[in-house]
Image (cartoon, helix red, strand yellow):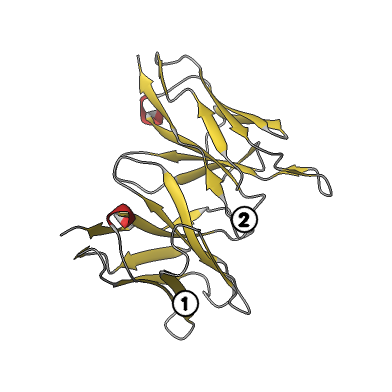
Amino acid sequence: DIVMTQSPDSVAVSLGERATIKCKSSQTVLYTSNNLNYLAWYQQTPGQPPKLLIHWASTRGPGVPGRFIGSGSGTDFTLTISDLQAEDVAIYYCQQYYGTPPTFGQGTRVEIK
Amino acid sequence: EVRLVESGGDLVQPGGSLRLSCAASGLKVSSDYISWVRQAPGRGLEWVSVIFGGGGTTQYADSVKDRFTISRDGAKNTVYLQMDSLRAEDTAVYYCATDSANGFRFNFWGQGTLVTVSS
Protein backbone atom coordinates (compact mmCIF):
# COMPACT_ATOMS: atom_id res chain seq x y z
CA ASP A 1 0.00 0.00 0.00
CA ILE A 2 1.10 3.57 -0.64
CA VAL A 3 1.63 5.34 2.69
CA MET A 4 0.72 9.02 2.86
CA THR A 5 2.40 11.12 5.54
CA GLN A 6 1.31 14.66 6.32
CA SER A 7 3.14 17.35 8.26
CA PRO A 8 2.57 19.00 10.57
CA ASP A 9 -0.19 17.28 12.53
CA SER A 10 -1.51 20.66 13.56
CA VAL A 11 -0.86 24.27 12.61
CA ALA A 12 -2.13 27.56 14.05
CA VAL A 13 -2.21 30.58 11.78
CA SER A 14 -3.46 34.13 12.22
CA LEU A 15 -6.43 35.28 10.19
CA GLY A 16 -5.27 36.58 6.84
CA GLU A 17 -1.98 34.71 7.01
CA ARG A 18 -0.82 31.61 5.14
CA ALA A 19 -1.10 27.97 6.20
CA THR A 20 1.10 25.35 4.57
CA ILE A 21 0.51 21.60 4.77
CA LYS A 22 2.89 18.98 3.39
CA CYS A 23 2.04 15.50 2.12
CA LYS A 24 4.55 12.85 1.17
CA SER A 25 3.78 9.54 -0.51
CA SER A 26 5.86 6.40 -0.05
CA GLN A 27 6.03 5.97 -3.82
CA THR A 28 5.29 8.14 -6.81
CA VAL A 29 1.68 8.97 -7.64
CA LEU A 30 2.63 10.51 -10.98
CA TYR A 31 1.30 8.49 -13.89
CA THR A 32 3.84 9.21 -16.59
CA SER A 33 1.61 8.25 -19.53
CA ASN A 34 -0.66 11.23 -18.89
CA ASN A 35 1.64 13.33 -16.65
CA LEU A 36 -1.03 13.51 -13.95
CA ASN A 37 -0.47 13.24 -10.22
CA TYR A 38 -3.21 11.10 -8.67
CA LEU A 39 -3.35 13.20 -5.52
CA ALA A 40 -6.35 14.87 -3.89
CA TRP A 41 -6.88 17.15 -0.91
CA TYR A 42 -9.99 17.17 1.29
CA GLN A 43 -11.31 19.52 3.93
CA GLN A 44 -13.36 18.17 6.83
CA THR A 45 -15.18 20.38 9.31
CA PRO A 46 -16.66 18.94 12.53
CA GLY A 47 -19.65 16.70 12.01
CA GLN A 48 -19.42 16.89 8.24
CA PRO A 49 -18.15 14.49 5.57
CA PRO A 50 -14.94 15.43 3.78
CA LYS A 51 -15.15 17.86 0.90
CA LEU A 52 -12.94 17.49 -2.17
CA LEU A 53 -10.83 20.65 -2.52
CA ILE A 54 -8.11 19.73 -4.99
CA HIS A 55 -7.60 16.89 -7.44
CA TRP A 56 -4.81 16.06 -9.86
CA ALA A 57 -2.62 17.70 -7.18
CA SER A 58 -3.38 21.25 -8.29
CA THR A 59 -6.88 21.46 -9.84
CA ARG A 60 -9.42 23.12 -7.59
CA GLY A 61 -12.86 21.53 -7.33
CA PRO A 62 -16.02 23.43 -8.33
CA GLY A 63 -16.63 26.41 -6.10
CA VAL A 64 -13.38 26.07 -4.16
CA PRO A 65 -11.92 29.50 -3.40
CA GLY A 66 -8.72 30.55 -5.10
CA ARG A 67 -6.91 30.85 -1.78
CA PHE A 68 -6.58 27.05 -1.75
CA ILE A 69 -3.54 26.14 -3.85
CA GLY A 70 -2.21 22.65 -4.45
CA SER A 71 1.27 22.01 -5.75
CA GLY A 72 3.92 19.33 -6.06
CA SER A 73 4.63 16.25 -8.12
CA GLY A 74 5.81 12.68 -7.77
CA THR A 75 6.01 12.06 -4.03
CA ASP A 76 5.96 15.53 -2.46
CA PHE A 77 2.91 17.77 -2.34
CA THR A 78 1.78 20.95 -0.63
CA LEU A 79 -1.57 22.51 0.17
CA THR A 80 -1.32 26.24 0.77
CA ILE A 81 -4.19 28.23 2.23
CA SER A 82 -3.43 31.87 1.67
CA ASP A 83 -5.35 34.63 3.45
CA LEU A 84 -6.74 32.22 6.07
CA GLN A 85 -10.39 32.75 6.89
CA ALA A 86 -12.32 31.64 9.98
CA GLU A 87 -14.30 29.14 7.90
CA ASP A 88 -11.05 27.40 6.91
CA VAL A 89 -10.67 25.91 10.40
CA ALA A 90 -10.83 22.22 9.66
CA ILE A 91 -8.84 19.03 9.26
CA TYR A 92 -7.20 18.59 5.88
CA TYR A 93 -6.37 15.22 4.35
CA CYS A 94 -4.34 14.26 1.32
CA GLN A 95 -5.24 11.09 -0.57
CA GLN A 96 -3.62 9.15 -3.37
CA TYR A 97 -5.79 7.47 -5.99
CA TYR A 98 -2.88 6.13 -8.04
CA GLY A 99 -2.91 2.67 -6.53
CA THR A 100 -5.31 0.31 -4.82
CA PRO A 101 -6.20 0.65 -2.05
CA PRO A 102 -6.63 4.42 -2.12
CA THR A 103 -4.97 5.78 1.00
CA PHE A 104 -5.21 8.95 3.05
CA GLY A 105 -2.77 10.94 5.11
CA GLN A 106 -3.38 11.11 8.84
CA GLY A 107 -4.77 14.63 8.61
CA THR A 108 -3.60 18.12 9.56
CA ARG A 109 -5.65 20.30 11.86
CA VAL A 110 -5.70 23.99 10.95
CA GLU A 111 -6.58 26.41 13.73
CA ILE A 112 -6.66 30.15 14.24
CA LYS A 113 -3.81 31.60 16.28
CA GLU B 1 -27.36 16.61 -8.48
CA VAL B 2 -25.73 13.56 -6.91
CA ARG B 3 -27.03 12.62 -3.48
CA LEU B 4 -25.95 9.69 -1.30
CA VAL B 5 -27.87 8.72 1.84
CA GLU B 6 -26.50 6.07 4.20
CA SER B 7 -28.57 4.14 6.73
CA GLY B 8 -28.37 1.04 8.87
CA GLY B 9 -25.81 2.06 11.46
CA ASP B 10 -26.45 0.76 14.97
CA LEU B 11 -24.96 -0.60 18.18
CA VAL B 12 -23.97 -4.24 17.72
CA GLN B 13 -22.10 -6.75 19.86
CA PRO B 14 -18.68 -8.08 18.88
CA GLY B 15 -19.10 -10.99 16.50
CA GLY B 16 -22.42 -9.64 15.26
CA SER B 17 -23.57 -8.53 11.82
CA LEU B 18 -25.02 -5.40 10.28
CA ARG B 19 -26.02 -4.29 6.80
CA LEU B 20 -25.52 -0.70 5.72
CA SER B 21 -27.34 0.87 2.79
CA CYS B 22 -26.37 3.74 0.52
CA ALA B 23 -29.29 5.09 -1.49
CA ALA B 24 -28.14 7.10 -4.50
CA SER B 25 -29.81 9.69 -6.67
CA GLY B 26 -28.38 11.65 -9.56
CA LEU B 27 -26.30 8.68 -10.70
CA LYS B 28 -26.77 5.00 -11.46
CA VAL B 29 -25.04 2.64 -9.06
CA SER B 30 -24.88 0.07 -11.84
CA SER B 31 -22.71 2.43 -13.91
CA ASP B 32 -20.52 4.19 -11.36
CA TYR B 33 -17.87 3.21 -8.84
CA ILE B 34 -19.24 3.44 -5.30
CA SER B 35 -16.95 3.13 -2.29
CA TRP B 36 -17.37 2.86 1.46
CA VAL B 37 -14.95 4.94 3.53
CA ARG B 38 -14.93 4.85 7.32
CA GLN B 39 -13.73 7.12 10.08
CA ALA B 40 -13.22 5.87 13.62
CA PRO B 41 -14.07 8.40 16.36
CA GLY B 42 -11.46 11.15 16.41
CA ARG B 43 -9.41 9.37 13.75
CA GLY B 44 -8.62 9.69 10.06
CA LEU B 45 -10.18 8.27 6.93
CA GLU B 46 -9.88 4.65 5.82
CA TRP B 47 -11.14 3.30 2.52
CA VAL B 48 -13.08 0.07 3.07
CA SER B 49 -14.48 -1.27 -0.19
CA VAL B 50 -15.55 -0.43 -3.73
CA ILE B 51 -17.96 -1.86 -6.27
CA PHE B 52 -17.15 -1.02 -9.86
CA GLY B 53 -19.70 0.11 -12.40
CA GLY B 54 -20.61 -2.28 -15.18
CA GLY B 55 -19.55 -5.79 -14.25
CA GLY B 56 -19.60 -5.08 -10.51
CA THR B 57 -16.07 -6.09 -9.60
CA THR B 58 -15.43 -5.60 -5.90
CA GLN B 59 -12.35 -4.80 -3.85
CA TYR B 60 -11.74 -4.65 -0.11
CA ALA B 61 -9.26 -3.30 2.37
CA ASP B 62 -7.22 -6.05 4.02
CA SER B 63 -8.72 -5.07 7.39
CA VAL B 64 -12.22 -6.13 6.29
CA LYS B 65 -11.54 -8.78 3.66
CA ASP B 66 -13.51 -12.00 4.20
CA ARG B 67 -15.77 -10.24 6.73
CA PHE B 68 -17.46 -7.49 4.70
CA THR B 69 -19.33 -7.83 1.40
CA ILE B 70 -20.30 -4.97 -0.90
CA SER B 71 -23.19 -5.37 -3.32
CA ARG B 72 -25.75 -3.31 -5.21
CA ASP B 73 -29.36 -3.34 -6.35
CA GLY B 74 -29.73 -1.44 -9.60
CA ALA B 75 -33.53 -1.37 -9.38
CA LYS B 76 -33.35 0.35 -5.99
CA ASN B 77 -30.23 2.31 -7.02
CA THR B 78 -28.70 1.31 -3.69
CA VAL B 79 -25.34 -0.07 -2.60
CA TYR B 80 -25.02 -2.27 0.47
CA LEU B 81 -22.24 -3.19 2.86
CA GLN B 82 -22.83 -6.45 4.69
CA MET B 83 -20.60 -6.51 7.75
CA ASP B 84 -20.08 -9.82 9.57
CA SER B 85 -17.85 -10.90 12.45
CA LEU B 86 -17.73 -7.32 13.66
CA ARG B 87 -14.95 -6.19 15.96
CA ALA B 88 -14.53 -3.24 18.28
CA GLU B 89 -12.08 -1.71 15.81
CA ASP B 90 -14.85 -1.57 13.18
CA THR B 91 -16.52 1.17 15.24
CA ALA B 92 -16.70 4.18 12.94
CA VAL B 93 -18.84 6.48 10.87
CA TYR B 94 -19.27 4.79 7.50
CA TYR B 95 -19.58 7.02 4.46
CA CYS B 96 -20.45 6.03 0.95
CA ALA B 97 -18.61 8.08 -1.61
CA THR B 98 -18.12 8.36 -5.34
CA ASP B 99 -16.65 10.49 -8.09
CA SER B 100 -18.00 11.29 -11.51
CA ALA B 101 -14.64 10.89 -13.23
CA ASN B 102 -12.39 8.57 -11.21
CA GLY B 103 -13.16 5.43 -9.29
CA PHE B 104 -10.91 6.06 -6.29
CA ARG B 105 -11.32 9.79 -5.84
CA PHE B 106 -14.34 11.08 -3.96
CA ASN B 107 -16.15 14.28 -4.86
CA PHE B 108 -19.54 13.16 -3.56
CA TRP B 109 -20.09 11.92 -0.02
CA GLY B 110 -23.07 10.95 2.07
CA GLN B 111 -23.53 12.24 5.61
CA GLY B 112 -22.46 8.91 7.10
CA THR B 113 -23.96 6.35 9.44
CA LEU B 114 -22.48 5.37 12.82
CA VAL B 115 -21.61 1.78 13.60
CA THR B 116 -20.69 1.01 17.21
CA VAL B 117 -19.37 -2.42 18.09
CA SER B 118 -19.47 -2.93 21.82
CA SER B 119 -20.76 -5.34 24.44
Q: Nearer the viewer, residue A66 or A49?
A: A49
Q: Tell us which disc is closer to us: 2 or 1.
A: 2
Residue hosting label 2: A100
> Residue B28 at x, y = what percent?
53, 75
Disc 2 secondary structure class: loop
Q: Quadrant of the C terminus of chain A?
A: top left
Dividing the picture into quadrants, the one containing residue B19 is bottom left
Q: Is residue A15 above or below residue B88?
A: above
Number of residues whose C-alpha sits closer than 10 Å to that of mark 1, classed few (under 14), some (14–19) or many (20 or more):
some
Residue B36 seen anywhere in this rendered image of the structure? yes
> Residue A23 at x, y = what percent?
58, 30
Q: Nearer the viewer, residue B116 or B101?
A: B116
How far apart marks 2 and 1 lie (CA) works out to 19 Å
Q: Residue at x 54, y 32 (%)?
A: A5
The chain holding disc 2 is: A
Q: Is residue A67 left or right of residue B91?
A: right
Q: Residue at x 46, y 86 (%)?
A: B75
Q: Is residue A99 left or right of residue A104?
A: right
> Residue B103 at x, y = what percent?
61, 60
Q: Amino acid at mark 2?
A: Thr
Q: Residue at x 25, y 70 (%)?
A: B16
Marking on residue B71: 1
- What is the number of callouts on the image? 2
Q: Amino acid at mark 1?
A: Ser
